[in-house]
Image (tube, coloured by chain):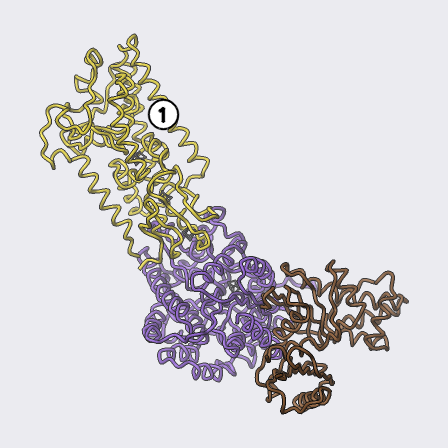
Chain colours: A yellow, B brown, C purple
Amino acid sequence: MNKRRITFLRRTVQILCLVMLVYGGYIFKVKHHTTQQANLFPALKAPEGYISTTKFDRGSILWPSGDNPVLENYPPGLVCRFNPRGGLFKACIVHFISENLTWRTSFKYLLPHLTLFMLLCFLFGRLWCRWACPIGTVGDFLTMLRKKMNIPSRKFPAGFRNGLRSGSYCILGTSFFISALIGVPHLARFQCYWFLPYCQICPARLICPIFGLIKPGWKDFETAITTMFTILAWLVLGIFVAAFYWGRRIWCHLCPVGLMNSWFNRGAGVELKKISVKCNKCGLCTEACPMGLTEMFEKKTDGVFNQSGCIMCLRCVEICPRDGCLSANFFGRKIVESRLKK
Amino acid sequence: MEIYAGIDIGSVTTKCVILQGKSIIGKALVKTGIDTEKCANDVLDMAAGDAGIKVEEIQRMVSTGYGRRIFRRADRIITEISAAAAGGYILCGEKATLIIDVGGQDTKVIEVNGKGEVLDFLMNDKCAAGTGRFLEIMSHVFETDIQGFSQLAIGSESPVAINSTCSVFAESEVVSLIASSARKEDIAAGLFRSIASRVAGMVRQFRRYELTVFCGGGAKSQALKGFIEKAIERPLIVLQEPQFVVAYGAACLAR
Amino acid sequence: MKNKEYLREDYAKTLKFFSKGKDSPEIPGNSEAIEKYRKLSGLKETDFFYDAFLKAKSTIPEKEKKPVAGYFCNTVPEELLLACGVHPVRLCSADSHCAECGEEAIPGDICPMVKAACGDFFHDFNRMMDLLIIPATCDGRVKLAEILSPVAKDIYFIDIPRNTDYLENVNIWEKEYTKFFDYLKSKFKVKPARREILDACVQTNERTRMYRKIYEARAKKPGIMNAFDYFIMANSSFFLSPAEWTEKASLLYREISGREQEPGRKKILLAGSPVVFPNFKILDILGDAGCCVSADVVCSAYGRLYDPVEIDEETESGIIRALSLKYVAPSICPCFVGIDKLINTVLDSVERYGLDGVIYYNIRLCQVFEMASGVLRSVLKDRDIPFLFLKTDFSKEDTGQLKTRVEAFMEMLG
Ligand code: SF4
Ligand code: SF4
Ligand code: SF4
Ligand code: SF4
């Protein structure tokens, strides 16, 4: 059909990111035996006496392999450390925060990592989600499959999307709470079951290792708690697949990493703007929005319409048929604006 | 001093004003006959006679009005809207004015800003409703002329409601009202009020003016003035000899 | 029982009687009008469009060897018809002679466009139309369809809700269009693949692109193409196939883009009721007053051709939704709720092309257009954009009055 430059660019970037994030280690051929060698910032290591006794050492549900990634840093997006040898980054931000809540790492060590995360989010908001997150890329592939099958996508009402967002807050809150709780020395013996609670159910943990041709730790029925996590993980994976297959990016309303990125969306360097008088209310922007957002359609004043749900895919800017109606700006400089496709 | 003429060829009367500088030195009015061009020439001659000059002494002539294209001697042709705007604006001391012109064939409302530029105007529909012609037809029904008709209306205390402003239908409505022994005064007042409310409806489309000027043949009727004032809740300025305002404006534009 | 139940066929006899003597393929006055405007044109490539008007109606079916479907207004998805191998023809007519012919079937104070459509139907389309499609736009057209249904071979009604808000109604549009598509498939016994609808969309999008180029060239350089040529070109898309139209329009575009603009012309935006050949009365008047219609927001040109089909997902449902987002959601037709679209489009065009004023043209007896004008007037007044409202019909007797207004408007613009 019509030439879609942004989609083409985005797909390319997505695939590049996927390759880099999961095979970066191979590509750069970095040998990394110790964490320090491949770290931008001060290394974060579990203090002595903690989790040395956890079952993860035995290579179970969380750890498919003991290898370390190239960089021990944490970008926005569900990039998962759980792929062997390959991963460019260590893990996602939820992993990072959970881990350190349990370890009670001093703030001094955390600061550079948090700053990096915030800087990236401040620059691009949730752009990472649609352009870099490897799990999102996998999900988009499922969406493509559906389109090939000529199955219409499901649209969800605003109430449902808001519900998912609340759910996301619950997940994030619960996993941080559990992480902090098991950091209390008296409760340290629970660490072997409750460590990184979100990671245990995260679909990225199950999917990323596959790219490295490694079998993820996909079942553990040893105790009641591990059984619970195993079943939850399957459930979430099921939701993940179904959500991406039928609901485009509806999953991303639930994802806690996306949630954390979204806090920076409104003030982010990437700004989406609308000039309302040029809008003909065709609704294409909402029709095409993978997150099902409506703000850019409903907005009746000129200006920025960054929404917390927006993953900055720029699909709306691309599809809008009115010249100059929607535009994407980077710190006030116009990058692209909508126009009739050639 | 240079001499200019403005000729307003209306559907009912043709008017001419001759200016020397800013002052009017001559004017004339005739009924527009079948031969519009001859009429225009006649009225020009009459006005020149009134001013005591020869037609050749007139430097520039501007024609306007419904028959403006027919008068071929004109140096410039403008529409009656611009002419009325210029006339009303200059005569009222160059302020932002709203000019209501109830003429023979149409009614116009023109908004002029403080610089004399026309901002917007409205004209009534193509039928005679709400125009001088309508009043004329109605005064025939009452067997009087417009002035007498107007006088009649002023005497009324409770005007009847008249719904139709279409001259044909209003006539039959009036006839049936007379038959039902309503007071003549009240019927006349009702007719004026129905026109006034139409004009007021047009006036309300405008908001940015200080003065409201009433001109054109219709402005000679005290009753119409009163009813319009009541309907728009503003005083109307009626110029002397309101039917010459357009011709005066045309003459001014010849400068 | 003395009074038998009414059947459609009962009325057919009357209609046939009305149409008697009017069913010549030639519409009187049409070719004179074409020659008149052709002389004014000064462009080579417009010849094709004028010729198309001369012979279009009688040649379409023979040339295309396809079934023909006639429709009114702008909310019938042409792409679906094209995909089914049907030749779509928009029947909106504005011929005063046709309006007279239609008088008998629909007498009274009815919009002349509706009467003309009826008369036009008597003339020629009756013979070659396999299907008549009526979208629920203005009441006049809907009722016309019903009146004509006894003689039409087949008739289909697309019931589009009055509210054109995307969020509210997109699912209903999708359902309506899908139903329509299913109907077409069963009627013409075809099973178009997704590819074929997409191809049809490509064709109409090409047309949109070409149209926009011309639209913008005209708006930016006043006088490179006069309003008659422009509307003839736009109107001919009513019955020409999109591919053919695009091809010829691109030649025209090449010709006009080499032309120089006429300096000092006042640029006007024409909005309001559809301007359809041969009712170019309003264009005649504007042209005589020396004003240049640089842009328009009317459904017979801009509203029909300006927006493309943008398909988000190439599933069948996705395509059909996208079609509704081309035809219904952005519709500027005042029959629908959504006057803000019309007003915003006018405001945007005025600013974007630096236009001097807006003229709103209203066909007498078309109430919705007239009602919308009040809002537009007040909005434009607040923004100091000169506005003129003109109400008229097909007759010539008010030309003088209208001319006065237009001339006064031009004097007002300075
Ligand atoms: S919200 Fe979606 S794209 Fe963003 S990190 Fe989560 S899974 Fe990835
Ligand atoms: S609002 Fe636009 S940029 Fe944001 S997610 Fe939706 S389509 Fe993408
Ligand atoms: S796609 Fe563009 S024109 Fe259409 S509703 Fe969205 S912003 Fe408006
Ligand atoms: S304005 Fe609306 S009803 Fe009228 S012809 Fe156009 S689409 Fe049809």
Marker count (numbered) = 1
In this view, the residue in front, C277 or C155, is: C277
Quadrant placement of the N terminus of chain A: bottom left
- Point out residue A339 in the picture as x, y percentages from the top left corner: 35, 56
Q: Residues within 10 Å of mark 1 (few under 14, many from 20)?
A: some
C190 sits to left or right of A87: right
Please report the residue visible at 65 percent of the width from the left and 91 percent of the height from the top.
B55
Quarter of the displayed picture in which ligand 1 can be seen: top left
- Where residue A84 sits in the image (x, y, percent)? 15, 28
Query: Which residue corresponds to mark 1?
Result: A171
Where is residue B159? Give x, y as percent. Answer: 84, 62
Quarter of the image with the C terminus of chain A is: bottom left
Could you say whether the residue bearing mark 1 is in a helix, strand or loop? helix
Image quadrant in which you'd find residue A229: top left
- The chain holding disc 1 is A
- Picture coordinates of residue C406, whole percent (x, y): 56, 73
Q: Nearer the viewer, residue C233 or B138?
A: B138
* Above or below: residue A294 compared with residue C245: above
Residue appearing at x 29%, y 26% in the figure: A94
Snapshot quadrant of residue C366: bottom right
